[in-house]
Amino acid sequence: MEQPRRITDSFPRRLRRRGAGRPPGRLKDKKDKKDKDQDKVQVKVRDCSRSPSQPAPDPALLEMLRRFDLSWEYGPCTGITRLQRWERAQELGLSPPGPIRDALLEHRDNPDVTYRWVWDGMGW
């Protein structure tokens, strides 16, 4: 009797290569892991959204923007910038706050102000 075919039967089998100079079953030295962790930290610092020349936005401004993000009366905020959301609310006649637009236009180049951040380490 013939065995049923599996999806993996249609793909060629490959042998796994072992790391150069490492016998099977041996773990890397702790030194290697430490170097790898330092590389990760350097990547995280390099990929930071705010450039070093941009100052951090005022906490009061961020709080005002957070309240704007959380108010459902201006519509959903997923997939668009804060300014696009403000303009959409204005077109729909929802009367969004004017100081929000002024702040967004003033800090247009700062992604911390332009975009809504889901997680900033403070839990909101």
Image: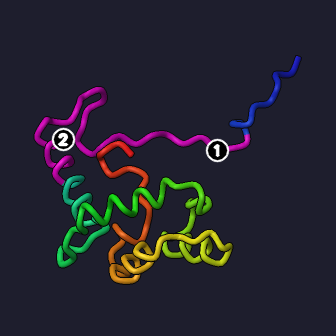
In this view, the residue in front, 31 or 96, is 96
**Residue 53, percent across and down?**
18, 78
Specify which label sits upstream in the sequence, 2 or 1: 1
Q: Secondary structure at mark 2?
A: helix
Front residue of this view, candidates 27 and 14? 27
Marks 2 and 1 sit apart, C-alpha to C-alpha, by 33 Å
Which residue sits at x=40%, y=75%?
A: 99
Task: State the extent of the magenta-drawn residues as a range.
Answer: 10-38
Considering depth in this image, is 41 or 118 the residue closer to the camera? 118
Mark 2 = which residue?
33
- Residue that sits furthest to the right in the current view: 1
Residue 110 percent across, percent down from the top left: 33, 75
Quarter occupied by residue 17: top left
Q: Main secondary structure of the magenta part?
A: loop
Compared across the picture, whether 37 is left or right of 8 comes to left
Residue drawn where x is 62% and y is 74% of the image: 88
Q: Amino acid at mark 1?
A: Pro
Q: Is residue 32 magenta?
A: yes
Q: Amino acid at mark 2?
A: Lys
Residue 118: x and y in percent read 43, 52
